[in-house]
Every structure is written in C-alpha cells, then in structure tokens.
Image (cartoon, rainbow, N blue to C red):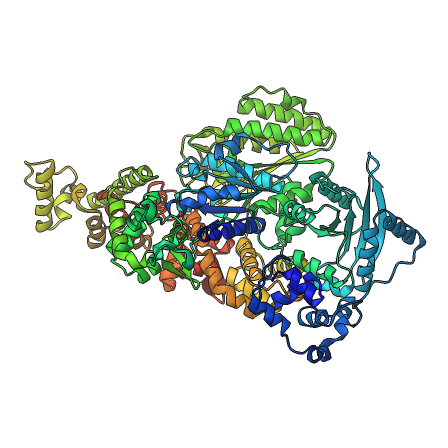
Amino acid sequence: MTKKDDYVADWLRDVESHSKRFSVLFVQLGAAHHPVRTRLSELQAKHVTLNEYLTQSSEGEKKSSGLVVIHDVADLAGKRQRRMGETRAQVMADLDRGDRFLLVSESCRGAFPPVPGSSLIEDAKVINGPMVPNAARVDSQRLSGLPGYDPSNGIGRDELLRAILADSDSKLLAALEYVCWERFESPRSSLEILSAQDLVDLRSSGLVQLDDGLHAWTVEDCWKEFRIAVADAVSAMTAAPVGIEDIYRQLWEIERMLRMMIGSAARETGGNHWRKSLFSAAEQEALVESARRDTQPTASSVADLRDPLEWLTLTALFDLRINKQLGDLGVAKYFWPKLASDLVPIRNRIAHNRIPRTGDQDAVRKWHTIICRGSSPGRQSP
Amino acid sequence: MRVYELAAELEVTTRRLIDHLRARGIAAHSTATDISRENVLKVRGDPPISDRRRRGLDAGQRLRGTSALSELLLTDTLPSLNSWQANPVPAPTTPDLLKNVRRLEVVYPAFRRHREALSLLGSQVVYATCISNNKGAESGLALVRFSGAIESAFGMTREVLFYYTPHRDLQFRDFKGARVALRSLNREVTPDLIFMCSEDERLDIKLDDWSKLEFTAIPLSPHLDEDPLSVISLIRDHIFARDLFYETSPVKGNRFFGRKTLLQSLRDDLNHQRVPALFGLRKSGKTSVLYQLAEELETPSTVTVLIDLESLPSPPDDPTPDLIADLKTKLQLQLKAKKQRTREIAELGNQPSIVEFKNALQGLLHRLSDDDVQVVLMLDEIEYLTPSDRVDIEEGDMPRIAQLLGALRSLVQENDNFTFMLSGLTSAITESGRLYGRPNPLFSWAKTHYLAPLLPEEADELARSTGGRMGIELTDGALESLYEASGGHAYLYRNFASFVVSSLPLDVYRRRIERSDVLRQSIPWRRSIAGNIEEMLAHLERYYPVEHILLDILRESPQDFAEISRAEERAFNHLIQLGLVMEENNEIQLNTILQIS
C-alpha cells in the first residue's frame, strides 16, 4: 500500500466506526472522490445495488448483515417518492435487526426529492469523502487534496473541476452561478451567502472543506478558473431541471390569477373606460407600442387591446395595484410585499431560461397555494 | 516499540499501560500499537515514583503483585480501588446461592476469577445457575450487583447478567440465546447490557459486530487480567463508547420520554372512540408517540395496526388499493397473533372495492365484539394520502381517498370496538371542509392534537436517564443550556446532546457535562445542524405556507407581527401549537431553533 492510500484505509475505519454510532450514513463519492469508490470493497460489509437490496428481501432472516453498503443510491434522485418510501421502510425494518447502512451516491443530498415525512436521505448522517493528507499530495494546489485529482492520469485541475460540476445538482449550480457571477463575491464572502444546505452539498462534493472548524473552498487558489468552470457548466446544462414543469405551470397560474384580480378591480373602478383610465398617456403609448411590435401591428390605442394588463411586466402589475389604489383584492395586505419580493426574481429567472435555485420551487408552490387555491387563510374572499 | 513490549519492560499490564498512554495524550489503540521512541522515553522517564506514591499510594496498595509503575498509573488515570469499593454489596451467604456459585465455578473456572475480581470491587454475585441446551451443553448465568460506586459511575441501577457459553466458535445464535436468557429471568435485571464470556479468540470482534446501541454485550475474556481494575476499564471502554442520545428510528419503551399528558389524551380519545389526529413538525417524534401508544394500548384483547403510508403510491396515483391490501395483511397478522380468526377479510378478493372492504371489516368487527376485542388502526405520514404540496386536496381528483376515510368513519360510528387515528405534518386534513371534491369526513370530527417541543422537565428526564446509562452526569446548567439551544425539539435536543457527548474524553472515569461543555459545543453544533434546520423549514413552507410567511414577517418586522397574528388567527395558533413561536409577557418570540437557520 502506498503512503497516499493509507488515508483511505483510515477513512474506511472511520466509516465503520461512524456506522456503529449513527446506523445510517450517506456519502457522496463523486468525481472528487472517485478512486475511493473502488476501495469500499475493503469494508467488512454486504455490498449491494439499490435494486438488489429492494428485490433480495431479507425478511425472515434473523441474523444481522452488519454493515450494508448500497452503492447506487443516486438512482433515487429524481425518482418518484414511492421508491424513496419503499427503500426507507426496508432500511428501517433491517435496522431493527441490527443492520447498519452506508448509502453511497454520486449525487449530492440536494439532488434527492423531498418527501412529506421522514426521509431516508435527509435523516442519514452525512459523512464526507477523505482528503489526501498534505504529505501525500502531488502538488501544492489545494485541489490536490481531493483523491480524484490525478494529473499523471489526465485529471488535472480543469478536468477535475469540470467533472465535479458536471456531477452537481442543478440547484447547486444555480447557487454557484449566483455567488460567482451575479454577486461577484470573493471566495470568503461567498461562503457567507450560500445556504446551509448548499454548504452541506459543496462539502460532500469536495469543493468546500472544514478548515479549523470553518468552511473553506478547496478551489480558493484557483478561483478564477473555478468561476469559468461554473460558467461553462451552467451554460452546458440543457436538460430541464427536476421540478421545472411545476414551477412554470404554477407561476403561469399565479400570474394569470393576479392579472385577472387586478383587471376585475380596474373594471369595477373604471367601468367601460378602464383601459384608458388605468394608464397615463405615456403608459398607454408604451403598451400599444409593445403590442404593435408583437402580435397587433395595427393597434393604435389601448382601446384596441383585448387586455392591456397582459402587456405589463409583473413588477409593473404590482406597482399598478399600489398606484391606482386598487385595494388588497382578497389577499391580506401584508402579504403583497412578500409576494412581490418572492416571485419577481423567480419569474425573471424562469422567463430568461435560467436555472431555478434551491427554494424556488417551494416559494412558488407556497404562493400558488395562497393565491390560486383561495381557501388558505392568507387569501380572503374579495 | 510496541505497547506489549513496553508493558513487559515496565512490568505492568498492557491495559494499564494503554490507559496511562492515553491519559498522557499518546495514541494507543491496542497492544500492538507502535510507540514512538520519544514517547517511550517520556514514559520511562516519568517523575520519581515516590513523589506520586505520596499522593495516592492507597490505590495500589491492595493490589497483589503490582509494580511501582502500575501504582503510579492507577493514581494518574483511575480512581483507587477503595473508591470503587464504596457502598459495597454484602457477600452472599444463602446456602443455595453458594452451592450454585460453586457449581458454576466447576463448569466455568473463569467464573471464579471473575467473581473474585468483582468481590475486590465491592460487587457480588447474587444469582447463579447453569442451563443445558438440548445437546447437553451447559451455559452459565450469573447476576452481579455492582458496588454503589460502580453503579453510580456507570449509570447502572440493577443487576447485570454475566453469561458463560461453552462454544469456542461463538455463533450469533449464542448471542441471541443470551438475550433470550436475559428476558426469561424473573428478576429486575439491566435490560440493555450483559457480559459475555467465551473461549472464542474473536469474542471482541464478534460481540462488537452483533451489539447494537440499545443492547451492548461486553466481551469478558476467560483469561481476564487478575487485576480487578481491569473490569472497570472494560466497563468504561464499552459503556462510554455508546451514544444513546443519537436516534435514527422511532423510539418506545425505556427509550421514550415524556409526553405523558399527550399520551393520556390520545388513550382517552381512543377509549371513547374519538378519532385523534396528531400533527407535528418533521422529526418532532410523532411516530415514536404512535409506537409508544401502541405499546401502552397492548392488551390480550386489543389489536393495534400501525400503517406507515410512506411506501404506498401517493396522489396523483391512487393509493387506496395498496392501502386496503396492506390493511388486510397487517390486520390478519395481528389477529392471528391474538388467536383470532380472520375469515371475513381473508375471503376478500385480490382487489376489493372500498365498499367490499368496509363490509368485510364490519362483519369481522361484529364477530370480534362478542369476544370484547378492540381494533385500533393508526395511519402514519398522512401526507402521503393528502400531499397538499403537490395536489389540490380540496378539489383534486382523488375521490377514493375521501371515500375510504369516510368508510373508516362509518365503521367507527357503527361499531363500538373500532377506532382509528392519524398523524402527519399538517392539520389541513381535519380543518378543510372539502376533501378531493367531497365533504371531508374528518372535518370537525377528528380531534386535533399537536406535538409541541418537549417540556423542560421532560427534556431533563431524557438527558439524565439516557446520560446515566452512558455513565454521564449532567449539571442543571448543562440541562438548561441544552434546552435553550435546541428549543426542546425532540430530535434537535438529542442531536445536540449526542454532539456534546462526542466531545467528552473517553479515558476518564467520571464523565460530567457542565454548562460550559454545552456552550463550547454550541456554535459548532449549530453549524453542523443548520442544513437540517433549513430542511425542516422547507417542509414548513410546503405544508404550512401562510405560517411560513408569518415567520418571515416576525423575523423581518416584529413590530407588525402582533396585528398580523390577530388577522391570521388560525395560522398563528398553528405556530404556537407547533412550538415555533412563543408568547411570553405579551411578547411573541421565535423558538431558538429558528434562529439557527
């Protein structure tokens, strides 16, 4: 065994010991820790794929299997909740028998779908892959602390960064895009902006590590290259992120509902002339110009537009409600500022074909429940 | 130089040397650990023995054949033998017991050595017997009462089983046999800890592999060091290595704490055929309450069926066929265990309609009522039937779920020996007038209970009792700080306690958590748990949207919150009941756990 490999043996011993304390462990062994995957066979454990685990029921077996390593847990990411539930139910039954579990995934924890109640993935103790000790690193780059860094085999800095980011969940990529390109943060300050869940995922992916109890980037000394790799990874993402269809549909319904609510109030206030009474002359001209450029080249005034509200941006729509004193429209008044501040940035991201961030889906779903279902306390009868 | 070589040179036991090395901060995992030259010199060059002797020679004085260094080691790392003898157990005098002890010593000579070592520690054998299996092999059982000092240090309160097996190649069935023997003893015995003795060379490894957190088997070598303090080291190494605070799965029995009032209310509801519905945050302990309730309801004439809905399909897929099949299977199993016939539901076809299922259950309940048998059904994780984050549960197209719940309600109303309860995250299922396009059968009918955070006294009981079983004492200040930091949330409280325990040294003989220990770990723990808290809040956002917004408002503009909370009375009440906000001195405050996120 080479010196460089010893740390993996130490890590495997830690895994064995953690499994006794925590019973269910989750580890992401993606590109940053790829060589470690082959060493898992050294664990005194039963090694199975997820499919094998679920089909080879251990029901009736009375003896504990000890440590069970399930190797392709990433298969549950993006799957329907039932599969997660089946797996958890089986794991819980086997825990009672004395089994312990190591859930090995190429994907980070954030890539797994949320479930209503107890979650196998969220409840598992996250452990991180090993880092190469300083003495065994091939060069002085911080990234060389990751076992996957192997320039002699063609996996240098740029290749490894690309591979790690290619493994990353879309929400994590969106978070990286935000700190690296939208906020243009320094490595240190960006760590204060990222959410706790993002930091958990960044640690398990190898991009962040704990240094004296504080988070630190493993890419701090190649931040410029990392930003470029993030930009490339985000641009290269062409598959629709999980949940985008729900976000899009619910946003569409919320916006239609808001336009309808504001339109109804405007009609009540302005009667048949509401189109003209609602907008100043300059605003009318701008609306007509928008319509002419798009679908109604012959339109000459707002009176020619079926619904001029449809030519307003969401922000302009919110402003209109306030400026024209159209009232709260059945939504509690203190919800309006939250509604606008939550929805406008998400709507803009989706409208510009960008990647939704962690929390976007939950926020849209929340407002959809309040605005569109109408039975929630926040949405009062107009 | 290896540990065993240095031990031989210094004429001390390897165990004692390892203790000494650890106390000096020198890593020593086993007798084969290589000790650096520098550390060997340090140990050889320890201060003159005579200086140390004056401070605590009594420690070693009563030991037979101990060298000067071993006496030194005792004073450095171990309380004296005299200390462990405090509050001794009187030696047995009953002729029957003495006869049984002698018999066990004949079958297992190691038992004599163990008994003598225990006796030097003020501890005595209080029961002994041999039991034969069907092949004539004899296992030995002895119950030991440890001295008051040992019990106090390691959180023991009852006799402990010492189990002797004749098998040189220990098998899992022997381990299970010991557990069976433990359960069969008609005495108050420590339920989660035994000593197991076998000639098997791999005894340590095997027991380590088979032991679980809630049941520890300490390997007892037949050739245990004659030094009685090696028994103490053995207990310490195994009891201190346990972390009983960390829980992965629901708890019941002696691992369940508090909730006495809630459990009483739920029992009353079920006894009076009211349908209780229990709601609480993620990881607040709902399933544990159901497990505990099922255990408390257990009588020969009560059949409790607990269904976890997580493995069933969920809307938009129809879960009712799978749910009915699951109900049928589990009900049959439970009834058979109570020696009851199940003909009415056994004769149901493979995919019965809801009406067929209801009629079959009706017939079964009628017959069971003649024998005074009660049936209680518990549906856990109700959101899998009503995923309000994904479908419109008021008007969505899944009428069979409403129909099935309606059938269960009818069965409760028509039979005095059946009721059911449900639990989940959100109370929407009992508060909404409509369910999947129909009148909601549970609306204003099921009785809602919320699982609030643990009360301070419940949390204290949990920490003291669990800590005690790991040989840990917690001061009042430590308990206060644990509660303040975790807001009394059951999972977070245990998690934080576990985090603090993991920071305690293992190479001491008295473990105590002070307020300062808790405070020192507070920030790293918060950092480690922040992701989980965010996940909990994401669940809140999914299932309690208005409440989530109220929390944001309370955080961002607390001055506006009082007025808003009056307007959103129901949502505000949810926040209070779930323990997320508290009203103190007319001031509304966020639970501490929300300040972590």
Q: Position of residue B444 (x, y in %)?
A: 52, 41
Q: Quadrant of the C terminus of chain A?
A: top left
Of all residues, the one furthest to the right in this rendering is: B95
B247 or B593: which is nearer to us? B247
Asked if residue A269 lies left or right of residue B65, the reply is left
Residue that appears at 88% across and 52% down:
B101
Above or below, comparing residue B166 to residue B573 in the picture: above
Q: Quadrant of residue A247?
A: top left
Q: Position of residue A229 (x, y in %)?
A: 26, 49
Asked if residue B432 lies left or right of residue B366, the reply is left
Q: How many marks?
A: 0
Asked if residue A334 lies left or right of residue B250, the reply is left
Above or below, comparing residue A143 to residue A261 in the picture: below
Tell me, yes or no, if residue A262 can be seen here: yes
Asked if residue B411 lies left or right of residue B86, the reply is left
B410 or B578: which is nearer to us? B578
Q: Position of residue B287 (x, y in %)?
A: 57, 44
A67 or A258: which is nearer to us? A67
Q: Position of residue A121 (x, y in %)?
A: 47, 44
Tell me, yes or no, if residue A357 can be seen here: no
Above or below, comparing residue B113 to residue B584 in the picture: above
